[in-house]
Amino acid sequence: AGLRSQFALGFMDPPLPPVSTISVPTVPTDLDWTVNQTALNMHRADIEQFVDAERNISLVRSEVRVGQVMHFDYSEQKYVFPISASLYSLIPEESPFQNKHYNACAVVGSGGILSNSYCGNEIDRADFVFRCNFAPIDKYKSHVGSKTNFTTFNPSVLEKYFNNLQTIYDRARFLGELRRLKGAVLWIPAFSFHGSNMVTRTLTDFFLEHERQFNPKLNLAWPGNVMKHFSDFWKTKGLSPKRLSTGMIVYTLATMFCEEVRLYGFWPYSVAPDHTPLSYHYYDKKGTTFTMKWKQAHQLPEEFNLLQQLHKHGVLKLTVTPCS
Ligand code: CTP
């Protein structure tokens, strides 16, 4: 009853300090963490009021048609993207998460806190591993693991890291990385910004060209205009950024399919709990200064505060110290 009343009182609605005054929080104590089934069930029920995870994770063919004009979550209404026959053929017939249920899941954010964490083995022991934005893993396996069952793929990744697939080398490298996914779900939010239109076309052409070379086949998920559902839920907890971070969306989805969710790489601070300096991403080049670019769209410290409260209540487990 005590717990229920904490929820009823909105324990997750702390007054949010302005970002500039936020300092590094006290580290969650991992040692005595246990899942609190009642709190977790209530949290899921809360989310379910806004998010239909199985449906929201991807459009399915029966919901759309060739020529249907899509709009974008974060662009003006005048911007459109008609669904081409190519894109239509890549949309799954049924939700990639239909009737799916996993035991222990790891959600891996890309924070520099994972560098030298030696969390790789622990992450790989999870039954299902969610990752963000196609983050590189090859050179960082001992710290971030290698198992990948789901990764988000913002079309802009193609521009940023694969030179828009302009050369044979970019294409070969991208193909190699996709093959390594071995049937994992690639979650492509193509209808978030109109700016990704051209890249989405390049991406769909590439998938179709190489479709037969994937064994097991690529498991693509194309969320429709669902971001509002996630924002509406988190708004009830006092969070209303311009955009939720990818990590927060992935965590929300994971909660709906997993018995237990463990978070790694979520730490939006420039120093570790022991005050050693950190890069923003675990894969940033040595010497890269911690970026504050996220401030334009996200409220990462406020997100972290909420995750920390959920940790304290046994709803999720945050890991922000080395694993061994
Ligand atoms: N993250 C974090 N602390 C960091 C870096 C990342 O908590 N220092 C989490 C955020 O939830 C972020 C996720 O890890 O969304 C994935 O990181 P990244 O790919 O860097 O996402 P961003 O580039 O920040 O952008 P976006 O969330 O808009 O995709």
Image: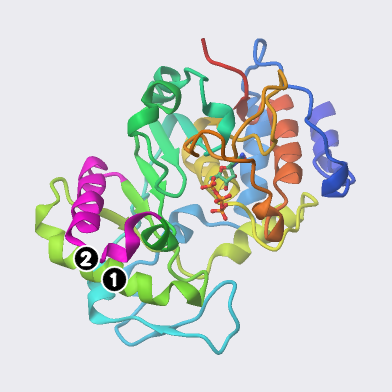
Q: In the image, residue 235 lies at what x, y percent?
A: 75, 56
What residue does disc 1 label? Answer: 202
From this view, report whether residue 190 is shown above or below residue 76.
above
Front residue of 152/139: it is 139
Residue at (52%, 69%) from the top-left corner?
192
Residue 166 relative to residue 155: left or right: left
Q: Main secondary structure of the magenta part?
A: helix
SS for tag 1? helix
Let me know if residue 110 is in the magenta part.
no
- Residue at the farthest front position: 287
Question: 10 Å neighbourhood of mark 2: few (<14), some, or many (≥20)?
Answer: some
* CA gap, disc 1 and disc 2: 6 Å
Residue 29 relative to residue 183: left or right: right
Residue 198 relative to residue 39: left or right: left
Specify the quadrant of the image occupied by residue 301. top right
Q: Please name the amino acid that badge 1 sits on.
A: Thr
Q: Is mark 1 within 8 Å of ligand 1?
A: no
- Note whether residue 207 is visible: yes
From this view, report whether residue 198 is shown above or below residue 317.
below
Let me know if residue 170 is in the magenta part.
yes
Residue at (47%, 17%) from the top-left corner?
118
Residue at (77%, 54%) from the top-left corner?
236
SS for tag 2? helix
- Note whether residue 91 is visible: no
Q: In the image, residue 86 lies at what x, y percent?
A: 23, 76
The quarter of the image holding the N terminus is: top right
Tag 1 and tag 2, C-beta contact below 8 Å = yes
Q: In the image, residue 239 lies at what x, y percent?
A: 76, 53
**Range shown magenta:** 161-184
Label drawn at residue 206: 2
Question: 10 Å neighbourhood of mark 1: few (<14), some, or many (≥20)?
Answer: some
